[in-house]
Image (cartoon, rainbow, N blue to C red):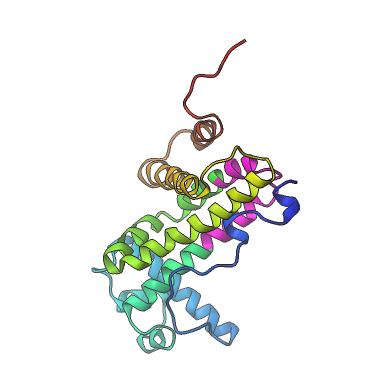
Amino acid sequence: MSTTQTGDTGIADVDATGPAGGMGPPKTARGQKTREALLRAAEKVFGEKGYYAASISEITQEAKVAMGTFYLYFKDKEDIFRALVGHMLELVRAHLRKHVAAAETQMEAERLGLKAFLSFVSRHKNLYRIVLDSYSVDETIYSSYFQVFAELYSRRLTRAEEQGEIVPGDAEVRAWCLIGISNFLGMRYARWKRPPSMEKVVDTAFDLIAHGLQPRQTR
């Protein structure tokens, strides 16, 4: 049975919540639009200045809303920061869902997922600073972000093992290993310095995931 036949594309398709934050979803389309504008502004301001140097006034100026409007959606700076980390988690999952949906096997999903993640962080370079800052703001925000990915990834790997798509092994350890690969490749090649060919980076990493480091036997 293939991955797509079960309707599961991994992290993106599992119903889960990340770090809490915000005062509940707006009840109107206009309210939702304003909240999203504040989150986009927060992504830019926190990403460029860091949590401690950023201010609510800078976020409202970037979002082009009044200061009082901010407090209709968030209690304080930490509240919008928590909501932002959860929002970024949902954006990553949505991006993965879109690009991994066509995968028919776990190994195909691994390659497509890695490529999709690197594509996402190339366009959202502030993601890393925001997530790293969350460690000093409240370690539970930071750990929750990665724990959500690890738990859902582990479930996906367990299903793939049950379906005979991958060799048996500790799904949790494997999940953290694979998350580490994606995370640091994104930091190195998407945030710090983009390579001449991102496709080559994906191919090299996928070869490691699929075949390991041992020399291949030749006939």
**Magenta-drawn stretch, dominant element (helix, strand or loop):** helix
Where is 195 relative to 3, above or below? above
Q: How many numbered marks are there?
A: 0
**Residue in view at x 48 percent, y 55 percent:** 150
Q: Is any atom of residue 61 visible in this view?
A: no
Where is 217 relative to 104, above or below? above
Where is residue 131, by image quadrant? bottom left
Image position, residue 9 (x, y; %): 64, 54
Residue 164 among those drawn in magenta: no
Q: Which is more toward the observer, 97 or 193?
A: 97
Q: Which is more toward the observer, 174 or 31?
A: 174
**Residue in view at x 41 percent, y 82 percent:** 65
Range of magenta residues: 91-113
Q: In which quadrant of the rendered image does the C terminus lie?
A: top right
Q: Is residue 61 left or right of residue 29?
A: left
Q: Is any atom of residue 202 visible in this view?
A: yes
Q: Which is more toward the observer, 82 or 150?
A: 150
Image position, residue 116 (x, y; %): 56, 48
What residue occupies the far left of the structure in this picture? 53
Residue 92 among those drawn in magenta: yes
**Residue in view at x 51 percent, y 32 percent:** 200
**Residue in view at x 60 percent, y 37 percent:** 167
Image position, residue 20 (x, y; %): 43, 75
Image position, residue 117 (x, y; %): 51, 49
